[in-house]
Structure formats: C-alpha cells, structure tokens
Image: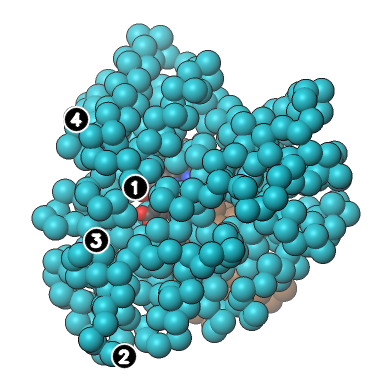
Amino acid sequence: MKIIVDQDKCVASGQCVSSAPDVFDQREDDGIVVLLNDNPPAGLADDVRQAAALCPALVITIVE
Amino acid sequence: MSTDHVPEYPMPRAAGCPFDPPPLLKQLQEEAPLTPISVFGKPAWMITRYAGQRLLADPRLSSDVSRPNFQGSSPQLLPQDDRFGAGFIALDDPEHSRMRRMVTAPFTVKRVEALRPKVQSIVDRLIDDLLAGPNPADLMAALALPIPSLVICELLGVPYENHDFFQQNSLSLLDTTAGPADQLKAHSNLGSFLDELIGQKITNPGEDLLTDLAEQVRAGNLSRSEAAGNGLLMLVAGHETTANMIALGTLALLEHPDQFELLKKTDDPSAVGGAVEELLRYLNIAHKGRWRQVVEDIEFEGHTLKAGDNVVFANNIANRDPAVFADPDTLDLTRDARQHVAFGFGPHACLGQPLARMELKVVYHTLYHRIPTLRLAVPLEEIPFKHDATVYGVASLPVTW
Ligand code: HEM
Ligand code: SF4
C-alpha cells in the first residue's frame, strides 16, 4: 500500500489522525496533514482506508 | 420525476417527529439524485443522496454570498453588507484557505486532546452547580450553553462575562425569521464587540486566537474588519452548535431509553466516541443544508448544473440514506456512523469538528454517569424546538433527577 496526500487541499480536519495516528500527523503551525509513513504495514491498511474515506477534502489517495 | 410540482424549501418536519428530517425529503431522496426545488420562490437544485454530497468538494462550487443571486438559508441574504463580512465561511479558495489556515493550529487533534482536562473540569464544576441548585432545572441554561461558551471564550480570548450579550446576538443572527434589520443589528453588534477585542489584543497580546488574528492584522495579512469577521464566525459557530448537540442529544437519549442505558453503563472511550458520531448523524443540527452557487457548468447525474444555478446539499437527509446507513431512521449508538456529513464536506468542512467531538465525548460520558436518574420535567410536547434557526435544537430543556 502506497499513500499520497495533497497538502495544498487539506483542510486540517484531523479525521486522518483520528483514524490512523501511526500514519498521519498534523503540522503544528496550521494543522495540515503530514504523512509519517507512506508505505504502512498491512495491519494498518483498514485504518488508512478509513482515513481516506473520511477525509472531507478528498486529499488522501491510496495506490494499492 | 414529475415536473408539474416543484417542492418548496425549506419544508416542515412531521408533527410529533422532532428528530427526523421533513418526510418529503425522504421521498425526494428515493425518487432522484437531483431535484429541482423552489427556495423562497426562486428556482434551485437539491441533492439529497449521500453519494451526491461529495460534490461539495468540487472547486466549481462557490460559497461566496456576494455573488449575484446567491441564495442562502434565510429568505433574504444574511447580513454580509456591514463592514465585518461573514468571515471565511463565505469566501472561496484561495482566499478562504489562506484565512482558514491562519486559525487552524488550535484545532488539531493533539491540541484539542491537550485541552480535554480543562473541559472535564468545566463540566464537573457545572454539574456540581446543577446538583446543588434547584430541581427541576433548565439543562440548556445550566450546562449546554455554558460549556461550549466557556471553551470557545478560552480559545479565542473573549471574556466570558460577556456571554449573555454574545449568546443573545448569536440567536438573533441565526434566526431565519428574524428579518434583515434584526439580523444585521445582531451581526454588527457582534462585529463591533470583536473589533474592539482585537484592538485590545494588538496593544495587549494574550495567548489566544484573537491575538493570532491581531498579529495577522499587524503583519498586513488581514484588515481589522476581516479579523473581526473571522473572530465573529468562530465565536458564533463555536458555542451555539455544540450547545444544541448537548441539549438535543440529551433529549434524544431520554426519548430512547435503551440507548440511554448503553451510554450510562459504558466507560469505553471508543463506545462513547461512537455514540457521539451516531448522535451527530441522527440529529444533524445544521439542518438547513449546505448552500452553494455553481461557478462553471457541472455535469451531474445526467443533468447540467449551469453557472449561476444555486444548489442546496441536504446533509440532514443524506445522513439518513439507506444506501450508506442500514435502518437509517433508528438511533443506534453501536453502529459505525463516522462517515456522516453532519460537519459538512469539502473545503468548508467544519473547522471546529475535533473540538466539538472532544467536548461532546466529555459531556455525554460525564453527565449521565453522574446523574443517571436524569429525565424530562415536562411532557415532550411542551419542549420548544427551534425549527426556524439555522442550527436546530431546543430553546430550553427542563429536566429533573
Ligand atoms: C457539533 C457541533 C458543530 C456542528 C454540527 C458544526 C457544523 C458545521 C457545518 C455543517 C459546517 C459547514 C458549513 C458549510 O458547508 O458552509 C461548519 C463550518 C464551520 N464550523 Fe462548525 N460545527 C460544530 C461546531 C463547531 C465549533 C465548536 C467550532 C469552533 C470554532 C466551529 C467552527 C466552524 C467554522 C469556523 C466553520 C467554517 C469553515 C469554513 O468555511 O472553512 N464549528 N460547521
Ligand atoms: S482528513 Fe483530510 S483534510 Fe483532514 S487533516 Fe487529514 S488530510 Fe487534511
């Protein structure tokens, strides 16, 4: 699983961090998404899919 | 779909069903993904299915209320024409995103979690006061309004002593039947109040969001009235919404005793979190829909949404779409409701959602554990529901224990 995020369109809602805190974080100064791991282990795949589904700005793309 | 009868919007809820969206919306959702409607006599489109709400992320849609013929949830335009404006909720990218990012820092999941002990102590203290005071009592006045008001005052750096002033003016501002003069007056009252506070922060900085906005004014990134407009937006959106979720959520639980029992018994944070999401979905207090204008033609479900057309995204009925939520009209605190659109969708998705979620988790977990005998002090028929408010809820909630 490979993940791509588009920081320009992120709205800092934090839904990704709540879904998969080991994979996503937020920048301290403006809450924009930071990818901690762009190739997470299979065990986190469901959480990452959940994050992508909940992202209100549609900025998380998963390349299986 | 028949074209001879175009439904009028807004439309009433069914009598005796204070938690359910208007029944006609359900019918429209079953019939078609896109419905021509009439909004205060003017033509518009309505999108009622869950899948269609994703269109809110399309940059060809505008939230800019200053566009000609832009239609909002009041018969008349909300008062944008005083000098404070409506803040970034009524702007489009890139200007919207530039301003929103100036204030996002305190709303990250980590910063909000760090605030939890403070919120817990506010909730504990207000419940102590409630229990020490007269029984029955109004839960709206005793808990639902003060909790989010105290929290947003703390975050923004607004003195809480002014709460009667900003709560009253927020109610007038959000009352779609108040009339333009009263709405405009409430808006300028709030704008002047925030403008004055920002002035104070310029000379006397604190550690709060209004100080951050004052910094942006000093740096030349915002005009002083823009800063006041954005402060106004956060003050109003930050207390009136969560307050209604606390009071209306409690009422919904009292009317669903089996669900109330589940919440009373659990200490599992993920069960409480799940309950918050389900109540957000089921109640969808931002019940007038999301309002947008098409900037550039969009092909949607075999139709063309033309530049200049107004579109209403009915997120309340989208949260009852059986294609996504099984048995959607049942309040089921154990379901996975996280994909609801009660906070909207797209670039304007609620800024305060991590904060609102945390506040509601603390309240729903603490209140019913500490007062398990909580019940209504009057029959349901006597509860005043705010049908005409932009944010749905109850005006008061008399409870006893
Ligand atoms: C349960 C409580 C809440 C609900 C149901 C709620 C709902 C919403 C909805 C539906 C929107 C989208 C507006 C649109 O599409 O144009 C929104 C936007 C917004 N909300 Fe909330 N909200 C809540 C709590 C809060 C809190 C606590 C704050 C604190 C500051 C807040 C601040 C905002 C702001 C600033 C916007 C505008 C975002 C933008 O335009 O980029 N909200 N909210
Ligand atoms: S869920 Fe989407 S919009 Fe929200 S912080 Fe994560 S990437 Fe950004």
- The secondary structure type at the circle numbered 2 is loop
Query: Image point 47% across, 78% down: which residue?
Result: B26
Q: Which residue is mark 2?
A: B1
Instruction: Tell me how far mark 1 sits from mark 4, CA to CA.
Output: 21 Å
Both labels 2 and 1 in a single chain: yes
Between B136 and B38, the one lying in front of the other is B136
Q: Position of residue A48 (x, y in %)?
A: 60, 69
Q: Which residue is mark 4?
A: B83
Specify which label sits upstream in the sequence, 2 or 4: 2
The chain drawn brown is chain what? A
Instruction: Tell me how far mark 3 sits from mark 4, CA to CA.
Output: 27 Å
* Dot 4 alpha-carbon crowd within 10 angstroms: few under 14, some 14 to 19, many 20 or more: some
Residue B40 - label: 3
Disc 2 vs disc 4: which is toward the camera? 2
Disc 1 vs disc 4: which is toward the camera? 1
Q: Would you say residue B401 is visible in this rendering?
A: yes
Quadrant occupied by the C terminus of chain B = top right
Between B182 and B211, the one lying in front of the other is B182
Instruction: Tell me how far mark 2 sits from mark 4, CA to CA.
Output: 44 Å
Specify which label sits upstream in the sequence, 3 or 4: 3
Q: Is mark 2 within 8 Å of ligand 1?
A: no
